[in-house]
Image (cartoon, grey):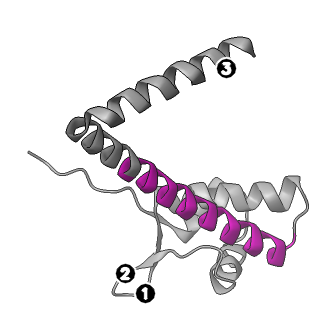
């Protein structure tokens, strides 16, 4: 079975895709906004993820007038939010597992869960 190779784009291709000068991409890299991979010969290669990130950066810059410092802050906040969402999802999964295991072990918990569920449904129906 063949393994799918990730699509990579050179700086010239990306610059022409977005109608920007390659120097703009170099500046974004210097500022830490994008991080293309490099070949052994130091050629920059952009992944699909880099392209999506660049689209977001250009939208902030072109459409919303956000400067580079603002873009940097927004990107960092976006990454923090994604990390928090991931941690929250892991916490929810952990709690669900713990409740499920406790539910299986203890008949008293089953009655509490059923009572709480009924009360919750009544409250939701009233709203």
Of label 3 and label 1, which has the lower sequence position? 1
Answer whether residue 89 is magenta in the image: yes
- Position of residue 24 in the picture relative to residue 103 (left or right): right
Mark 3 = which residue?
123
Residue extending farthest front:
108
Q: CA distance from mark 3 to mark 2?
A: 60 Å
- The image position of residue 76, as x and y in percent, is 67, 72
Secondary structure beneath disc 1? loop
* Residue drawn at the location 61% of the way across and 67% of the way down: 80
Q: CA distance from mark 1 to mark 2?
A: 5 Å
Residue extending farthest left:
1
* Residue drawn at the location 42% of the way across and 32% of the way down: 112
Asked if labels 2 and 1 touch by Cβ distance under 8 angstroms, the answer is yes
Q: CA distance from mark 3 to mark 1?
A: 62 Å
Q: Quadrant of the N terminus?
A: top left
* Residue drawn at the location 54% of the way across and 76% of the way down: 35
- Quadrant of residue 71 in the image? bottom right
Of label 3 and label 2, which has the lower sequence position? 2
Secondary structure beneath disc 2? loop
Secondary structure beneath disc 3? helix
| Residue stretch in magenta | 67-94
- Position of residue 44 in the picture relative to residue 119 (left or right): left
Asked if labels 1 and 3 touch by Cβ distance under 8 angstroms, the answer is no
Mark 1 = which residue?
42
- The image position of residue 104, as x and y in percent, is 22, 36
Q: Residues within 10 Å of mark 1 (few under 14, many from 20)?
A: few
Mark 2 = which residue?
39
Q: Quadrant of the C terminus?
A: top right
Q: Nearer the viewer, residue 112 or 10?
A: 112
């Amino acid at each position: 079975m063949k393994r799918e190779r990730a699509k990579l784009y050179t700086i010239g291709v990306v610059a022409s895709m977005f109608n920007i000068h390659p120097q703009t991409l170099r500046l974004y890299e210097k500022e830490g906004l994008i991080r293309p991979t490099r070949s052994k010969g130091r050629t920059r290669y952009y992944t699909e993820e880099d392209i999506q990130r660049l689209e977001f950066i250009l939208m902030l810059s072109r459409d919303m007038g956000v400067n580079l410092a603002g873009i940097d802050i927004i990107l960092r906040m976006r990454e923090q939010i994604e990390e928090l969402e991931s941690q929250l999802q892991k916490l929810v999964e952990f709690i669900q597992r713990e409740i499920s295991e406790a539910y299986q072990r203890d008949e008293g918990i089953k009655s509490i869960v059923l009572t709480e569920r009924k009360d919750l449904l009544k409250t939701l129906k009233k709203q």
